[in-house]
Amino acid sequence: MIAEFVCSAVALVLYVNTLGADFCYDDSRAIKTNQDLLPETPWINIFYDDFWGTLLTHSGSHKSYRPLCTLSFRLNHALGGLEPWGYHLVNVGLHGAVTALFTWLARVLLGEGLWSLLAGLLFASHPIHTEAVAGVVGRADVGAALFFLLSLLCYVRHCALRGGPAGPCRLGAWLLGSLGCAACSMLWKEQGVTVLAVSALYDVCVFHRLKLHQVIMLFYKRRNVHLLLSVLLLAAWGAVLLVCRLYWMGNKPPNFSNSDNPAGDSPSLLTRALTFLYLPAVNMWLLLCPNTLSFDWSMDALPLIRGIVEWRNLQTVAFYVGLLLLTWFGLCTRRVKGKETNGKAHQVTNGNGRSNTNGHSYHHPDVPDHTNFETEPHPASAQNGTKKHYVTRTRLPTTENVVVFSLGLLAIPFLPATNLFFYVGFVIAERVLYIPSMGFCLLLAVGLRALYVRLRRRSSRTVLVYCSAAMVLLFGVKTVLRNQDWQNEEMLYKSGIYVNPAKAWGNLGNVLKNQGKMAEAEQAYRNALYYRRNMADMLYNLGLLLQENNKFSEALHYYKLAIGSRPTLASAYLNTGIVLMNQGRLDEAKRTFLTCADIPDENLKDPHAHKSSVTSCLYNLGKLLHEQGHQEEALSVYKEAIQKMPRQFAPQSLYNMMGEAYMRLNKLTDAEHWYRESLRAKPDHIPAHLTYGKLLALTGQKTEAERYFLKAIQLDPTKGNCYMHYGQFLLEESRLLEAAEMAEKAAHLDSGEFDVVFSAAHMLSIQQP
């Protein structure tokens, strides 16, 4: 257990600098704006919504069903609110636990000693994990990996006991534990279900040590019933889980935009095929040389391969040739006598010494025999994989066995991300490599072990060990440095400019704008549009920034470009209407608001934000009609807004305007109801205090009215409008001196507001003798 402790400790130390990090990138949508984390939201909603809080059956849902991960976020929220350090602490702790379990698995396959320790250290320090661990939403991958390994290790134990003296209850408990953990892994993240296929591979190629021709004969002749039943049970459970998940998400695949996965949207079959074949080679290179990492690889970060003559196809060919050679080595090569025992070599001559066909049973005096099955009896196959008998196996798997298993652990969990079965919403996602990297680390460790055995000179072996240590050290340094990029969004987006300049500049513009650096933000938006001119979000964000700087004509230009690029962008319609209102183009503003209100929310990435923008459009349309004196039409629009209002929308202003419209129609009871609803929605909503105070004064409840006016002033003593309304109330009560005092305060605080200054002057003129 020392190796597990050491590797886990290294993993924790390498990521301790993430505990002070902020929420970054996707964390905002998954945590800060996810209604499923709030205590007022029924916790059962988590099992009906996707990872981002959208109803799973909605046409615009991402279909990422990860309820256990969302539950962990909700627990974080209940304990510490939106303090990022608690979320990061859980991520780092989970990574430490996963590292310990992986090192345990490596010890099962490689035995005690240097090579299992090396595999664990490689996993603990690999920089490809930074997105999964340092980014809070990466918890889905880390949590899935935890239960992935628990399921696999339970199945390893089940194999060890199968056919031995263990009773059926004990045997079944380990199997049920494996199946249950597989389900939990899938409920953390979709790819977790692939552990069932990896477990089957372990049973066939590691526990039974079958070669390709033996596997074919096994299924053809239907011998070794125990193995067949186990594999069929794993396949059946996997099918059940997949069918249930498909049914739960509405039997429909998700829809992704062109920018998320450009190859999937390409009309050319050749382009799609060449690009999709190339992507696994790029992912493998990221595992081999994680020098260039990015928070996002979408859009044009990796240009499409449009023809056979492109040089990148050579990388694709080299990758698949290497993969096939390793597979052939593991599945088709014959065993060699007297090969190696966990890094120690022994040559068998004239039949002397202990040897066998797997090449791992020779007992060197310095290297004890190890077992991954705790020397319990279990069924084994004869050389043809069909004749069953009982032996006590105390040997490690052969190098060929471990190579095949490592390739499976590398490839099988990655299959859902290959676009082979369905299109995914990304080009490359580094956090998706968290589980496959286990196979890579095992493959690298067993390869170095094989090289170590073949080196005859002691000095050469020493150099190899030092090189391995240097690789772990370099990985660790890169991980710590990459963690710094995840400290905050500004650093993260700056680090991604080299890989994905359009996305990085656009997101950086949002950060700079929130920091008040308007000129820098504007330049960042323009840089993003230089690389990709049709980005609707960036066109809209630039328009919004220009609108806030009172450059209304230019803002209107960019809003229209955003609408042209994405006709369903409701927020662009909303702000277009507001600018048109400010320019006095009221009829155009009405038409814009009405157009926005009719946009359906189907197939939209964020239907909640869309509904909020539609509700705001209807609110502004109703306010425009209210100011024009069309109270009945205004009320009709407000009622439509209430019907379309999403649960996260703040309704206090809408309710207050409903009350205002009823006041104009002299329906005081209805007006009072909506004023109270406004205050119930937001008890410190100042406009509702003022309007409700006016209603109370009108109905003769003077004392109560004055209490609401004073409460409004107390809520914001710097708001001149509050003093103006209170002064008008005092004027009506003939308390002229007090009214004059309020008028002076109002004019002083809001000297730039014409209505406030004019009303103050009017009150002061009345007070004069």
Image (cartoon, rainbow, N blue to C red):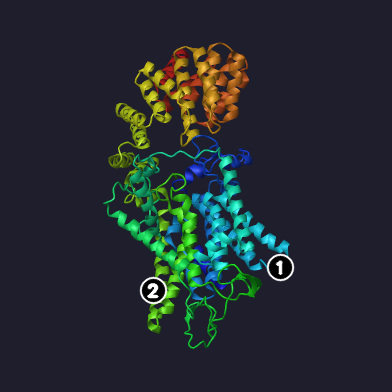
In this rendering, the answer to whether 399 lies above or below 97 is: below
Q: Within the image, what quadrant is residue 226 found in? A: bottom right
Helix, strand or loop for disc 2: helix
Q: Residue 257: x, y in percent?
A: 41, 38
Mark 1 or 2: in front is 1
Which label is found at residue 166?
1
Residue type, numbered disc 2: Cys
In this rendered view, identify the residue nearer to me: 740 or 29: 29
Residue 337 lies left or right of residue 268; in this view the side is: right
Helix, strand or loop for disc 1: loop
Q: Residue 619: x, y in percent?
A: 48, 23
- Within 10 angstroms of label 1, few (less than 14), some, or many (20 or more) residues? some
Q: Which residue is disc 2 drawn over? A: 467
- Within 10 angstroms of label 2, few (less than 14), some, or many (20 or more) residues? few
Q: CA distance from mark 1 to mark 2?
A: 44 Å
Residue type, numbered disc 1: Ala
Can residue 202 be seen?
A: no
Q: Earlier in the sequence, mark 1 or mark 2?
A: 1
